[in-house]
Amino acid sequence: MKVTILGARGSIPTEGPEMLEFGGGTSCVLVENEDSAIFLDAGTGIINSPDIGDKAISILMTHPHLDHVLGLPFFPYIFEKGRDIGFYAGKNGLLTTYEQLGTVFSNPLWPCRIEDYPSGITFHDAEFPLQIGEFTITGIPSVHPGGGIVYRLEDNGKSIIYATDYEYMEDKIGDLIEFAKDCDLLLFDAQYTDEEFEMRRGYGHSTVAQGLEVMKKSGTKNIRFVHHDPRHTDEFLRKMEAPVKSEYVAFARKDEVIIL
């Protein structure tokens, strides 16, 4: 299993020389095996997708907030005629996956409908367990305003958890710990410092210390912290990372590749 960090920034895209190391593209992670390419979210990071050849493409959306779908109109493979793309999301209220995407691909927000693109996109309301090629995918509800999904992908004895836009709550964290049990890689939302978290309870994000607690209690082997705050520069993020960095613990960086 190959994991590529395409976008690790949260809330809004950022740019500038002080944001180069960790990157400014919003949420998108590519998970591949020999036959399938699964994109977790479609933030602006998806625009810089690497060449995936003729692998089957799927996009799993955690939730339809703009920073997680903003890159989709510019996704390179959406312009390929005959390229099939499966799009999966949980129902958001009463909205189907198609209806959620339709709000982005419609006037006055965007001039093109999803049907106007050359590729063939199919829409699926995610029900678990979900089988995509050799990947077995399960999910649990996230803790975030408006809801969302935490995904677990398994293939060939390896597993990855994608827990972005997740707020630590004492009465709910046990569900995530159990869901992440013995996983090989946990991608965990650590947008805030401890001080910021106290000021922003209810915003739907967590901290490094909270992620490390999940890692320890779940028996997770590796963790990468994602959804970096748009105000946090490379220097700031390195300072956040320094006390905990190890072979197994780090902040996700743009274009980082992890082989499981």
Image (tube, rainbow, N blue to C red):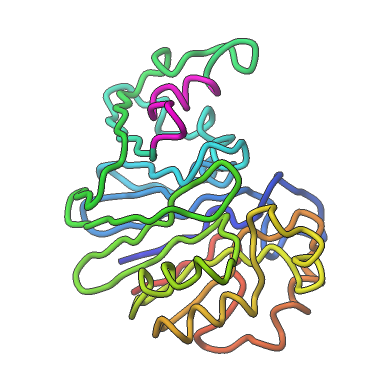
In the rendered image, which quarter contains the C terminus?
bottom left
User: Vertically, is 238 above or below 164?
Assistant: below
Q: Is residue 112 left or right of residue 40?
A: right
Who is closer to the viewer here, 49 or 94?
A: 94
Residue at 38% across, 56% down: 140
User: Vertically, is 202 above or below 96?
Assistant: below
The spot of residue 250 in percent (x, y) is: 59, 78
Within the magenta stretch, is there residue 254?
A: no
In the rendered image, which quarter contains the N terminus?
bottom left
Count of marks overlaid on the render: 0
Who is closer to the viewer here, 208 or 27?
A: 208
The spot of residue 91 in percent (x, y) is: 39, 35
Question: Which stretch appears magenta?
Answer: 91-104
Within the magenta stretch, is there residue 92?
A: yes
Residue at 51% across, 50% down: 28
Residue at 30% across, 23% down: 120
Q: Is residue 258 left or right of residue 170?
A: left
Q: Is residue 64 left or right of residue 156?
A: right
The spot of residue 209 in percent (x, y) is: 64, 80
The spot of residue 32 in percent (x, y) is: 32, 57
Q: Is residue 192 left or right of residue 155?
A: right
User: Vertically, is 49 above or below 79?
Assistant: below
